[in-house]
Amino acid sequence: MEAFEKAGKRVHVVGDLNAGVIVALDMEGRLFTVLDGEVLNHVNLEAVSGESTQNKYIIAGGDGLWPAPEGTSLGYHYSSGSWRVPPGIRGARYLVDKATKLDATILAEVDLINAKGLGIPTIFSRQVTIDKGNSWVNVHVVESITYIGRLPLQRTDGLLVPWTLCMLDSGPGCHALFPCADQLFVWDLYDDAKCREQEWSGGMYKAATNASHRFQIAMDEVPWVEFHDVNGGLVVRRQANPLAKGHSTIDISDLPPDVAPGEKGVRYSVYSDTTNFMEIEVAGGCPEVILPDSEMSLAVSTRFTRT
């Protein structure tokens, strides 16, 4: 909070600083969950004091809302040919639309350009509600992206889903865990061989997020994904509501813009980085045709528990 104040960046607090969420309105609308006065998400104070540019994106931490797909010919991170976070995302300034003590809705107007060069005007919305107990706080977020363009978007021209990325400090003694009926339902978006090195037994899949190597495990549909920090005494579970009728998952892969999106859709993913953070990611669904004023929404609950 001191860093935001010093940088002159606006925040809004849902709940309080004992159990709640710090909403960084001037930093992509990112959410930082607090329990007992401690921020539980990954935090990079350099991002609070600085500004991302075309040539340098400062990973901020927290829980962010991005559009997917990331890469491929319809992605939003390769519209200039090489990977970059779009200026519409990194420069988004959110406004509080409505709020009470335990909930808030924030909005931002974001113009996107996909790798085909197609401009896609949108409204991003994050509806945040919390409930809390003695050793836990549950953050419910309805993420939505509304297409406000004037022409329908066919799937051959544009894909668009809300994609929420919850960043957590991670390293030795940390792992992700989720139920999985068949190992074939899980694959790695970077190197599938690494995916097969993880533990799978008794219908549970366990992936060490110990910063030893970079990977991104993807799943088409599982009931939930948990992060366990054994040494730090923290468990974080993310669970999404079913997709809207007529919406389906898409390929969110970080692939070059000359590659077409694959048929395999992603619902959850676990990203582990070598710089001691990980992400539990959840992606929404896309209709067959995105009509003007269509809303693509995703409801996710993230429960933080001190053990």
Image (cartoon, grey):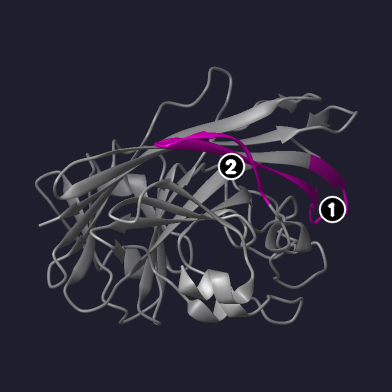
Give the left or right position of residue 41, taking residue 91 as reference: left
Q: Please name the amino acid that badge 1 sits on.
A: Lys
Mark number displayed over residue 116: 1
Specify the quadrant of the image occupied by residue 239. Answer: top left
Does the segment drawn in magenta span residue 103?
yes
- Give 160 or 139, whichever is nearer the viewer: 139
Q: Give the x, y percent position of residue 203.
A: 15, 43
- Proximity of marks 2 and 1: CB atoms separated by less than 8 Å: no
In terms of secondary structure, what is the magenta stretch mainly? strand
Give the left or right position of residue 73, taking residue 132 as reference: right
Label 2 belongs to which residue?
162
Q: Give the x, y percent position of residue 286.
A: 62, 32
The quarter of the picture where the C terminus appears is: bottom left
Q: Secondary structure at mark 2?
A: strand
The first of marks 2 and 1 along the sequence is 1
Q: Give the vertical position of 252 relative to 26 (above or below).
A: above
Does the segment drawn in magenta span residue 239?
no
Specify the quadrant of the image occupied by residue 278. Answer: bottom left
The mark closer to the camera, 2 or 1, is 2
Identify the residue shown where x is 71% and y is 70%.
84
Identify the residue shown where x is 62% and y is 38%.
125
Q: Residues within 10 Å of mark 1 (few under 14, many from 20)?
A: some
Q: Please name the amino acid that badge 2 sits on.
A: Pro
- Give 76 or 98, whichever is nearer the viewer: 98
Mark number displayed over residue 219: none
> Which residue range is magenta in the image?
94-121
Q: Secondary structure at mark 1?
A: loop
Identify the residue shown where x is 62% and y is 66%.
9
Q: Give the vertical position of 284 relative to 42 (above or below).
A: above
Spatial CA span between label 2 and label 1:
19 Å
Asked whether the viewer can see residue 75, the reply is yes
